Amino acid sequence: MVNKIHFGKRIAALRRTKGLSQVELAEKLGVTSQAVSKWECGNAVPDIDLLLDLSHLYHVTINKMLEDVDLLYELTESQTGSSDIAYFVSEEDPNLEWANEIIHGGWIRRNWEHAQYENFYRDAVGKQIALCDGVILEIGAGPGGGFMPYVLKANPDAVIIISDLSPTVVREWKSFLDRTLASPNLYYSAFDFCNMPFKDNCIDIISDGGGIGNCIGEKTNALKEAYRVLKPGGKLITSTGFVNKETLASLPSETQKILLNKRPDIFEDLYEDTVLAGFSKIDSVISGSWYTDNDDSEIADLARSLGINLKFTSYTRYCMKE
Ligand SMILES: C[S@@+](CC[C@H](N)C(=O)[O-])C[C@H]1O[C@@H](n2cnc3c(N)ncnc32)[C@H](O)[C@@H]1O
């Protein structure tokens, strides 16, 4: 069955790429601008002659305008079920407490709204990712959505697979974005990014706003998997933070020992692992810093128990698969 809303969004995006207004398109087709508006809002579908005219004007087939593509089936070759979310993990969340907080605390809506304010750094990264006209994979999207809200801000027509290990995170984003954007170009999947369900060489950009940095599993496997699924020329854009050597050296020696023993991961900047995963061209940009005193993470609790306010340096890394 044709999803009229998706059809409307697709032809509106095609019109925008041609730089036409609704009125200009209506004039070209010999219809009223109200008719164009009805198609684009999903209230009506043009008749067959007009579909043919649109197909010639936009240089796309009628099928491409009308049909929803099962992108996740194409990229994974697995049947993804009928729920519009491709699950490669259990549909039940292992962390029910966190899942309930996300649902009942309205985290998704709040984070989306927060992302609509100007944020120099995230907006800049989002714009760069949005330049991609292929498939963007947002991994470990989490309740913040990683870079996805900023990519959609720059280009509401971007093709993005929104994913997380938590099925609740994925369901909540789907339910929110279906209501907010109803884009035909958004796909949803729950999987472990240390063992991705995708074929080799099929993704254009992997976007990671703090997922790998908070990895449940081996970060090195996540980097290797990112390399495997990216197309040659594809990029992993990954952002996280770590505690640098200078900060470590400034702490009392007993505190250093405890931290190195309990959380060695927070001192890793993952550069070597990124090279070992296969990425040859890597640009790192330091984007700022944050302190643990206002945080409610495990590491912040540990820092408080040690009586310190720990400084993290945040960076974004652009890693190319050649
Ligand atoms: C603490 S969040 C922070 C980053 C997140 N992008 C955001 O903006 O909210 C980290 C997210 O990574 C996800 N994650 C951790 N390990 C993962 C894995 N192995 N596979 C997929 N997602 C993972 C978690 O479920 C969580 O939603």
Image (cartoon, grey):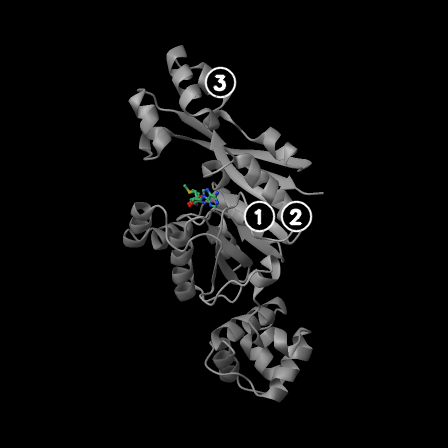
Can you say whether 194 is above or below 289 in the image?
Answer: below
Question: Number of numbered discs present?
Answer: 3
Type of amino acid under label 1: Ile
N-terminal of the pair, mark 2 or mark 3, is: 2
| Mark 1 crowd level (few <14, some 14–19, many ≥20, 10 Å Cα) | many
- Determine if residue 248 is in view: yes
Q: How far apart are marks 1 and 3 (CA)?
A: 31 Å
Can you say whether 294 is above or below 16 in the image?
Answer: above
Q: How far apart are marks 2 and 3 (CA)?
A: 34 Å
Q: In this view, does 307 lie to the left or right of 158?
A: left
Q: At numbered mark 3, what does the secondary structure look like: helix, strand or loop?
A: helix
Q: At numbered mark 1, what does the secondary structure look like: helix, strand or loop?
A: strand
Can you say whether 109 is above or below 299 in the image?
Answer: below
Q: At numbered mark 2, what does the secondary structure look like: helix, strand or loop?
A: strand
Type of amino acid under label 3: Glu
Dot in front, 1 or 3? 1
Q: If the picture is divided into quarters, which one holds ligand 1?
A: top left
Q: Residue at x 69, y 74 (%)?
A: 59
Task: Residue 155 in the image: state x and y as whole percent.
Answer: 54, 58
Q: Which residue is drawn at 53% across and 49% down?
A: 126
Q: Are marks 1 and 2 in contact (CB under 8 Å)?
A: yes
**Would the CB of label 3 be found within 8 Å of ligand 1?**
no
Q: In this view, does 55 lie to the left or right of 238?
A: right
In this figure, which residue is indicated by the disc labeled 3? Answer: 246
| Mark 2 crowd level (few <14, some 14–19, many ≥20, 10 Å Cα) | many
Residue 234 is marked as 2
Q: Distance between the residues labelled 1 and 2?
A: 8 Å
In this figure, which residue is indicated by the disc labeled 1? Answer: 206
| Mark 3 crowd level (few <14, some 14–19, many ≥20, 10 Å Cα) | few
Task: Residue 216 in the image: state x and y as whole percent.
Answer: 45, 39
Type of amino acid under label 2: Gly
In terms of depth relative to the viewer, which is nearer, 96 or 254? 96
